[in-house]
Amino acid sequence: MLIWSAIGLLAVTLFGLGAIVMLDVRAKGWANWLDTVHEWQSTIGTVAGFLSAAGVLVLGTAIQDNAERTRSLTASRAIGMGLALETERMANPLQTGRLIGGNIDMQGNDLPNKCLNYVHTMESILTPDTPVYNAVLSQMVDFGDANLALFVRFFSFYVDFRSNLTQIDKQICDAAPADQINYIMHQLNGGLSFYEIIARNYDVTPIIDPALIRSNAGLPPAEPK
């Protein structure tokens, strides 16, 4: 855009200068046109020099802007890829947790203990650290609104999910074990829906369908809750 504006300004300037010279030639007569042009020679040279310098400045600025945009896009892509790989690592225990929850017999005996064991298992398998996210958090202002929102939502979910698990104790599982298990599964599905978009955008490991895992393991389909 900057280059086209400069070209337009150059064309207008040259056209205007040419028109002025032509008017002066007509006023002084065509018989003396060489003398008239010679009189304008200094002005034409000055204008040409100015336009040349302006052109170099505009071109340099355009090249610098393009290099900056390229650098920004490259940096954003690198940050996104690093975060995508970290979310891939974090999503593995989430998928495992969803598979475990799907295999719990909600009609079986001792459901409160199964609920508590499920919570403890989830706490033990979740990835505790997010080094990439912590390292690039200060740089994410230049990351682009869509990607920024997507990753922030996933990592916010992850932090909240881990925190919520610590609030579920034996008393809560004894009071409403089925509700707690279903709520954990609901949270897992929500978090994995964020990861599914990340995996699609950055070509990392996709979510594995729990039904496919059960089928490959020779297990019967999970019963509806």
Image (cartoon, helix red, strand yellow):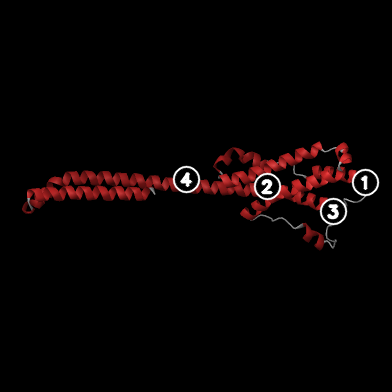
Question: Residue 210: percent from the left, percent from the top?
Answer: 78, 57
Left or right of residue 203: residue 4: left
Q: Which residue is mark 1?
A: 110
Which of the two labelled residues, at mark 4 and mark 3, occupies the earlier sequence position? 4
Q: Which mark is residue 81?
A: none
Q: Is residue 74 visible?
A: yes
Q: Amino acid at mark 3?
A: Asn
Q: Which residue is mark 4?
A: 68
C-alpha span from label 1 to label 4: 62 Å
Question: Residue 218: percent from the left, percent from the top?
Answer: 84, 63
Q: Which mark is residue 103?
A: 3
Q: Is residue 212 above or below residue 198?
A: below
Foreground disc of the pair 4, 3: 3
Q: Amino acid at mark 2?
A: Glu
Which of the two labelled residues, at mark 1 and mark 3, occupies the earlier sequence position? 3
Residue 205 lies in what quarter of the image? Answer: bottom right
Determine the residue positioned at 67% across, 45% down: 154
Depth check: give the residue in front, 141 or 192: 192
Depth check: give the residue in front, 132 or 101: 101
Q: Which mark is residue 86?
A: 2
